[in-house]
Amino acid sequence: MRRRFVIEAVMIATYGHLLVPSRPVDFVVPYSSIAELYDMRDGTDPVMEDPDDDGHVKTKINELITFFEDSLNRKKIEKALQMPWRESSALLLNEMIQFTVVHAVDNAHYGELFDPIETEMLLTGLRLEIPLLSDQYEFQDKLIEAEVPVQVYDIEDFEFAVEEGISSVDMEL
């Protein structure tokens, strides 16, 4: 059984260890975070502070864009974009990793506390009842402070989340 996580597309390009999980994974990606990849690739602002790291991540961003633009993948994504909250069919990267693109829709409920992509991520996690992966401590802290009932794992805890995770029963205790 695949473990599912909501994640921003850029995190996949930034953290290579996400692409070598010990068990099958389904990365659920709000479409707006895919659109953000184009801005990062084409923008003049660095993604990473170190120039070598920045060049490497921008190469990975371009590879990810190419994957999502593949004709079969693009058709699956376009079908999902026809209706709010529709999920795409599985976009298979390999036997261990698949992506599901969600046409997430921001709403005012959390919109004042979180930026639009953060809001779409947390709403996707809530709606699909799956945990989030993030490297942004401020986002994680805001989730806790706002008492958003969604599970979040730090990127550094990815392997734990894949292998064991914390069950919803454990969360209630």
Image (cartoon, rainbow, N blue to C red):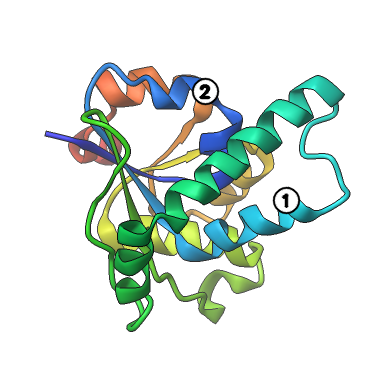
Please give the label number shown on residue 99.
none
Q: Residue 150's spot in the image, x, y percent?
A: 39, 50
Q: Nearer the viewer, residue 60 or 28?
A: 60
Q: Residue 159's spot in the image, x, y percent?
A: 37, 18
- Residue 133's place in the image compared with 33, above or below, is above
User: Amino acid under label 1?
Assistant: Met
Could one spot residue 8 in this view of the protein? no
Labels 2 and 1 touching (C-beta < 8 A): no
Q: Residue 132's spot in the image, x, y percent?
A: 42, 44
Asked whether, in this view, residue 111 is left or right of residue 164, the answer is right
Marks 2 and 1 sit apart, C-alpha to C-alpha, by 17 Å
Disc 2: which residue? 16
Q: Residue at x 54, y 40 (%)?
A: 63
Quadrant in which the N terminus is drawn: top left
- Residue 134's place in the image compared with 117, above or below, is above
User: Amino acid under label 2?
Assistant: Gly
Quadrant housing residue 68: bottom left
Q: Nearer the viewer, residue 23 or 132?
A: 23
Q: Residue at x 36, y 61 (%)?
A: 71
Please give the label number shown on residue 40.
1
Q: Residue at x 40, y 54 (%)?
A: 70
Asked whether, in this view, residue 30 is left or right of residue 135, the answer is left
